[in-house]
Amino acid sequence: MAVRLGLTNVASLGPRKALLPVRLPSLLSVPAPDRYPSHHRHFYTSLSSTISPLQLVRDFSQSQITMSASASDLSPISTYAKELAAAKKAASLAARLCQMVQAEILQSDVQSKADKSPVTVADYGSQAIVSFVLDMELSSGPFSMVAEEDSEDLRKDSSKEILSRITELVNDTLSTDPSFCNVILSEEGILSAIDKGTSEGGSSGRHWVLDPIDGTKGFLRGDQYAIALALLDEGKVVLGVLACPNLPLASIQNTTQNVGESGCLFSAIVGNGAWMQSLDEGSSPTKIQVTSTDDPVDASFFESFEAAHSLHDLTSNIAKKLGVKAPPVRIDSQAKYGALARGDGAIYLRFPHKGYREKIWDHAAGYIVVTEAGGVVTDAAGNDLDFSKGRYLDLDTGIMATNKKLMPSLLVAVQDSIKEQQQSASLL
Ligand code: AMP
Ligand code: MG
């Protein structure tokens, strides 16, 4: 029997997740129009008259490209502190938009549940918000983002209604933040923000990596999902933020039901550890660590809720070989990485069906949260994950994560199980 973790009804959303917007902590103290360079202030006025797409924001950027190079001798925390604040703000606002849409889905009748357009609205809306907020908050250098969505389908005549709904939702969400309460994005501004995510990434320069809703199946079911945002610098993940609106703040170890408040924001900067705080206003981060267990008997493991995303037979065999006694905890999205990073479980196993190519946005944020919490994330051969190859991760067979003590025996169990699986396949 596997353990399933998720929301079961709208009532469990609690007061913070009601449809009314809740104010997020303001990370900046000066009123909005004065905080941005004069060029950004121009964007504000242009936006108010709804003529301007995002291009206006960026045409000053070339003059400021030197900033990241001159910052390279600073410590990691001071190098990326501004980026982290912007990423937290972007992911928290996107989470708010997603929460509003998920609450609507859960309240809708059975017939409209079959309609997948709410998830489309939330996906595009989340990407537009993250792109816009990062662009507004960070004025240093060219902006590159590798993200799941682009605006091609949204530009079709058949998508007019959806685009209008996304625009309304994005503007409503932005208006809940004091920094953006004067902003009104036009439909073209939304499309333009979404298309900032079409970068190919790679091994040089900085690239943001975004999954606007990781775990859309869980999102639709009312279960776990995450807004996953990371920053690559010269091909390495240097910063990550995971907003998990439905993940309980308390440990989910040995629980089959949601307990207490939910809504977690995980964050990490390379060399500065991993942190977790509530998505609520005014929360402060606390440092988190992976479990220190070295005995597989005490270990429990996470895997995808969806059998189509990971081979449950193979993972069950791996767990058996390792001596794991507890049933798998099946949850959607990179919330698994967050839960692992704070020690709710000891192992994460992900073995997709043959031929599936993993995308960097499905792992970048989770990877740095786990590694900064003292864990290890590798492919099935024990290699580190390489995020520098573009939009895909080219890796051997699957992904696993655990603490440093358990990794050697996990690697043996994984390789033995894969060998057995290959041998039985060759006998067929
Ligand atoms: P999870 O919720 O951990 O099962 O993973 C969710 C992510 O799996 C989604 O964001 C998709 O990008 C990705 N995904 C989609 N199809 C597959 C597949 N066939 N195998 C593995 N992962 C997939
Ligand atoms: Mg995803």
Image (cartoon, rainbow, N blue to C red):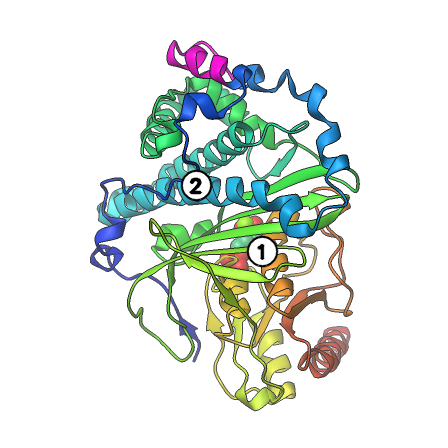
Locate residue 197 relative to residue 202 in the image: left or right: left
Give the amino acid type for the residue marked by disc 1 in the picture. Ala
From this view, report whether residue 43 is shown above or below residue 163. above
Callout 1: SS: strand
Asked whether disc 1 touches disc 2, contact meaning CB atoms under 8 Å apart, the reply is no
* CA–CA distance in space, label 1 to label 2: 17 Å
Q: Image quadrant for the N terminus?
A: bottom left
Return the mark for residue 297. none
Look at the image and tell me whether residue 114 can be seen: no
Mark in the foreground, 1 or 2: 2
Q: Earlier in the sequence, mark 1 or mark 2?
A: 2
Cβ(mark 1) to ligand 2 < 8 Å?
Answer: no
Q: Whole-percent x and y of residue 8?
A: 28, 62
Residue drawn at the location 38% of the way across and 52% of the way down: 279
Please tell me in which quadrant of the rendered image residue 406 appears.
Answer: bottom right
Callout 2: SS: loop
Q: Magenta span covers which residues?
A: 41-53
Return the mark for residue 268. 1
Locate residue 269 relative to residue 219 in the image: left or right: right
Q: Please, what is the dominant secondary structure of the magenta stretch?
A: helix
Return the mark for residue 27. 2
From this view, report whether residue 69 is shown above or below residue 114. above
